[in-house]
Amino acid sequence: MRYKTPGYVRRLSDFLAEARISSGYESDRAVETMNAGERRLGPYVGGKFSYVDIYSGSRRFSGKEEISSEGEVVWAREYDGGIFDAKVEDKAMEEVYSFLKAAMLLFPRYEPYKRGPDEFRNGEWLYTDVCKGDMVSFKGSEIVSLGGRTLYALAYGGGLIKV
């Protein structure tokens, strides 16, 4: 099948990197609020592919990114996490998410299924992303900590829908 060809997976990977930069959380594009408080980033369209990221929540959230081709979902990543420390106030929450966005901007372009780099530091802030797999099938987790105290954690996974 075409989904197993290295050329197809490479094109899909390149598109995901482009879509994340252009319309994902890493971009400066506006977030559209939908029914029931869902938020949507995208769609971003390039060639035969279309990307969208839909999520719910803020302090704690979950969502799903999808890439479609010819009206059919061909790749997806689901994620769930957020700030679990009840002592983190709203102002501090903004700092956590600002640091998270800075880390996610540094996602490896050759591995766009990962949410961020393996590690990113800025002063006492630390972001880590541990991911196993590849564009076809993967599972990972990310953590943001400040001064050794974990403030945010998220689990994610996904891959090709058609194999």
Image (spheres, rainbow, N blue to C red):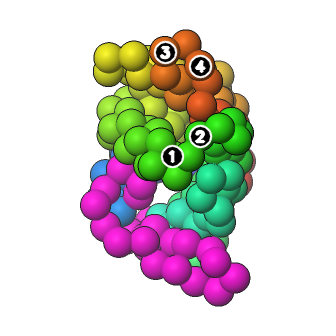
Q: Which residue is mark 1?
A: 93
Spatial distance from mark 4 to mark 3, Cα to Cα? 6 Å
Of the pair 143 and 133, the residue shown nearer to us = 143
Looking at the image, is 136 positioned above or below residue 48?
above
Q: Write the start and end of the magenta stretch as one range.
A: 24-49
- Residue contact between numbered discs 1 and 4, judged by CB atoms under 8 Å: no
Which callout, 3 or 1, points at the residue further toward the start of the chain?
Answer: 1
Secondary structure beneath disc 2?
loop
- Residue contact between numbered discs 1 and 2, judged by CB atoms under 8 Å: yes
- Residue contact between numbered discs 3 and 1, judged by CB atoms under 8 Å: no
- Dividing the picture into quarters, in which one does residue 119 lie? top left
Dot 4 amino acid type: Arg
Q: Which residue is mark 3?
A: 147
Q: Which residue is mark 2?
A: 88
Q: Is 36 part of what is drawn in magenta?
A: yes
Which callout, 1 or 2, points at the residue further toward the start of the chain?
Answer: 2
Secondary structure beneath disc 4?
strand
Secondary structure beneath disc 3?
loop
Question: Neighbour class for label 4 at 10 Å: few (<14), some, many (≥20)?
Answer: few
Which callout, 4 or 2, points at the residue further toward the start of the chain?
Answer: 2
Of the pair 24 and 16, the residue shown nearer to us = 24
- Dividing the picture into quarters, in which one does residue 130 lie? top right
Looking at the image, is 3 positioned above or below residue 141?
below
Of the pair 21 and 69, the residue shown nearer to us = 21
97 sits to left or right of 55: left
- Dividing the picture into quarters, in which one does residue 149 lie? top right
Q: Is 138 part of what is drawn in magenta?
A: no
Dot 2 amino acid type: Val
Spatial distance from mark 1 to mark 4, Cα to Cα? 14 Å
Spatial distance from mark 3 to mark 1, Cα to Cα? 15 Å
